[in-house]
Image: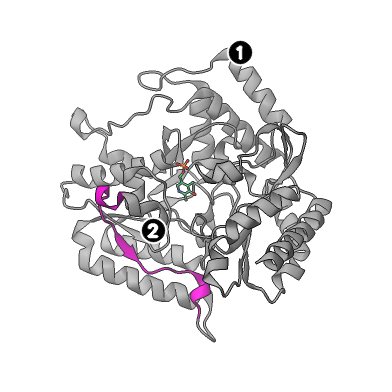
Amino acid sequence: MRRHETAPPIAIARGRGAWLYDADGRRYLDAISSWWVNLFGHTHPRINRALTEQLERLEHAMLAGFTHEPVVALSEKLSALTGHVLGHCFYASDGASAVEIALKMSAHAWRNAGQADKREFICVAGGYHGETLGALGVTDTALFRAPYESLLRPAHIAASPDARLAGPGESAADVAARALADMEQLLQRHHGRIAAVIVEPLVQCASGMVMHDPGYVGGLRRLCNVYGAHLIADEIAVGCGRSGSFFACEQAGVWPDFLCLSKGISGGYLPLSLVMAREHIYQAFYDDDVRRGFLHSHSYTGNPLACRAALETLAIFEDEAVLDRNRAFARTMTAALQTLAHDPRIAHFRRTGMIWACDAVIADPAAAAGFSRRFAAEAARRELLMRPIGNSLYLMPPYVLDAQDADWLGRRVHDVFDAVMEAT
Ligand SMILES: *Cc1c(COP(=O)(O)O)cnc(C)c1O
């Protein structure tokens, strides 16, 4: 709150495409998709129209004892995108709620199977799954956890598959293999008490766009099968095409038992989250006894407006061959970032799908401490919305930029970096 006295929040008045405009008419390129939610730019004509039409029909109805067309259509579309392997959807509003649902549903499914001891979780070092108590319990980010540590139920933390940990002559796959060996030890020792392993497939976004070899996710699937644990894929940030495929798990060639989606699924318009689950999870709750049912609800679960925004988002993916277009754009964007990538003050330039990241090399710890804040302020002065995580700069733009934008963005990021480093 004290920081706001010297750096007041910027009052955004309107948005159009990739740009946000403040109350004074200054503009900002939203290079991080407003915290990773916005896929096709602000005030998108198609999503606006779909929402306006939905608004005239039905704004909301409870999803207990009732259902509605948008939530049914959305569930069927998403199920089809997994080849109906993840054929069941459970709805909520925010990402953290989806994680809570997956954790509860996993433990409850084991309980219904007569294995009530399986109620502990394994998460991955540096992982982030949201900030409600259950989600925070499987989150390994000291800054978010520390004040609430005494409120949290501890989880087992497995070694990080971070590709940057590769030693000389090692590949990302070697690091992944080492991390999997550590995961296997945990499962060997504790499998009788483990309900599920939770992972952010391909990119741990909140801990600084930490990327790993897709083989890690495939390896987790194998280990979970061998040791009888569920696999929860938290695709809240990496889903919806962000990783390059619609679901990040596709690149590992496996499906989890639970897949959490939120953020981009509504195109960045409205809070919507959901957990997709396999048939065997559904069957674990298929019973006349209400105590064996999954009793979890949120008031705005499956809100029709949010579902309609999600349906239009999926329609845009289909109609505009978005994944192909992104692949072409990614080559252009990567080319536009080459001078930054080769700057001697930059390390670990990396990319997965539509996420670019690199680390600023700052020797002085005092200078490193304020880097992110200084960078964000300088970026805003130069019409750019970016918020580095620690020393890690990243771009996570909406899927609507063209070659000219990429060129502008590449140069502008480097200019901001130069200005911040000179003042450091
Ligand atoms: C953002 C995020 C969450 C939490 O979502 P909220 O909507 O902020 O609660 C959970 N997991 C991952 C991987 C995220 O990036």
Residue 79 percent across, percent down from the top left = 49, 40
For label 2, the SS is: helix
Look at 64% across and 45% down and name the residue there: 33
CA gap between label 2 and label 1 equals 46 Å
Q: Is residue 156 magenta?
A: yes
Looking at this rendering, what residue extends furthest in the right direction? 404
The residue that disc 1 covers is 56
Look at 72% across and 73% down and name the residue there: 343
Crowdedness near tag 1: few (<14), some (14–19) or many (≥20) residues, C-alpha within 10 Å:
few
In the image, what residue type sits under mark 2?
Answer: Ala
Near-viewer residue (117 or 367): 367
Residue 109 percent across, percent down from the top left = 25, 44
Look at 54% across and 15% down and name the residue there: 58
For label 1, the SS is: helix
Image quadrant assignment for residue 92: top left
Q: Which residues are magenta?
A: 148-166
Q: Is residue 107 left or right of residue 59?
A: left
Q: Is residue 163 magenta?
A: yes
Sooner in the amino-acid sequence: mark 2 or mark 1: 1
Residue 231 in sight in this render: no
Q: Is residue 239 left or right of residue 39?
A: left
- Quarter of the image with the C terminus is bottom right
In the image, what residue type sits under mark 1?
Answer: Glu
Residue 302 percent across, percent down from the top left = 46, 28
Near-viewer residue (264 or 232): 264
